[in-house]
């Protein structure tokens, strides 16, 4: 049997595969033609279970290319339908850790941010617009500013919706553009071209069993996450 591809597995059963997405890798194939996380996960399943032909994996959510963290795929069509519905009905608990520029001092340290977002697909950017504008979608995010040290701030996000670039826009709106996120106001890129946003935890009811699946993705091994690396929760 061939060697397993180098993929970090968080959970694997007959219906669910959860992996850690590194920065710089698209979740699904895109116009770049680069290998995607979906490609790698399919190959892992093919080799691990010695499956001939095409391997089914259902995409139920995505992370932006420069973002790291937990990604879940469905291994059966039944699981794909049920997990997609869980994400659609906001019954999946999601926690993201972020490192942003320090921004202005003062103001609240937590809250719920409600925005209406519209995407410019040509520029691949999202703007905050008025409710009712064409293609505007509501984005709801609970947030906490955990600490501000020197030029950086640590943020925790719990999004209730899953809009494109939702947390990147939220961080910029709060005055803490994510480190490396030049699209939304960061002053400098990060060396690996990532943005400092990490999908830390994901919790949901298993699609075929009466049990909760709780997943935690370790932080990337880069300096801007060093002071948080040994924390389980913040």
Image: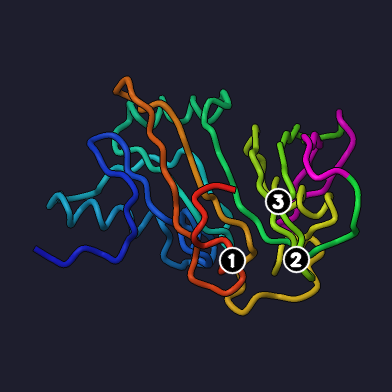
Q: Residue at x 34, y 29 (%)?
A: 79
Q: Secondary structure at mark 1?
A: helix
Q: Which residue is mark 1?
A: 227
Marker disc for residue 146: 3
Q: CA distance from mark 2 to mark 1?
A: 11 Å
Q: CA distance from mark 3 to mark 1?
A: 12 Å
Give the class, few, some or many, for how many residues have Cα within 10 Å of label 2's Cα (few <14, many ≥20): few
Circles 2 and 1: CB atoms closer than 8 Å: yes
Q: Residue at x 49, y 26 (%)?
A: 86
Q: Nearer the viewer, residue 226 or 142?
A: 226
Q: Is residue 112 magenta?
A: yes
Q: Is residue 38 magenta?
A: no
Q: Residue furthest top?
A: 210
Q: Nearer the viewer, residue 121 or 61?
A: 61
In this rendering, would 135 be left or right of 42?
A: right
Name the quadrant containing residue 148.
Answer: bottom right
> Quarter of the image containing the N terminus?
bottom left
Magenta region, residue range: 108-132
The answer to whether residue 133 is above or below residue 187 is above
Q: Secondary structure at mark 2?
A: strand
Q: Which residue is mark 2?
A: 149
Q: Nearer the viewer, residue 106 or 114?
A: 106
């Amino acid at each position: 049997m061939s060697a397993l591809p180098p993929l970090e597995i968080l959970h694997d059963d007959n219906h669910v595969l959860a992996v850690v997405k590194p920065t710089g890798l698209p979740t699904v194939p895109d116009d770049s033609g680069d290998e995607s996380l979906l490609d790698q996960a399919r190959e892992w399943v093919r080799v691990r279970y010695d499956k001939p032909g095409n391997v089914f994996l259902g995409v139920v959510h995505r992370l932006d290319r420069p973002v790291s963290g937990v990604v879940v795929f469905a291994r059966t069509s039944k699981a794909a339908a049920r997990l997609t519905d869980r994400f659609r009905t906001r019954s999946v608990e999601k926690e993201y850790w972020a490192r942003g520029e320090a921004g202005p001092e003062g103001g609240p340290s937590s809250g719920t941010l409600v925005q209406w977002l519209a995407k410019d697909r040509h520029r691949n950017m999202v703007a905050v617009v008025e409710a009712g504008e064409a293609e505007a979608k509501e984005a709801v995010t609970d947030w906490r500013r955990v600490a501000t040290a020197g030029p950086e701030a640590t943020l925790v996000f719990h999004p209730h919706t899953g809009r494109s670039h939702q947390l990147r826009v939220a961080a910029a709106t709060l005055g803490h553009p994510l480190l490396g996120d030049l699209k939304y106001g960061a002053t400098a890129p990060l060396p690996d071209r990532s943005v400092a946003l990490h999908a830390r935890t994901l919790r949901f009811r298993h699609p075929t069993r009466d049990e909760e699946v709780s997943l935690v993705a370790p932080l990337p091994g880069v300096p801007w996450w060093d002071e948080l690396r040994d924390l389980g929760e913040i």
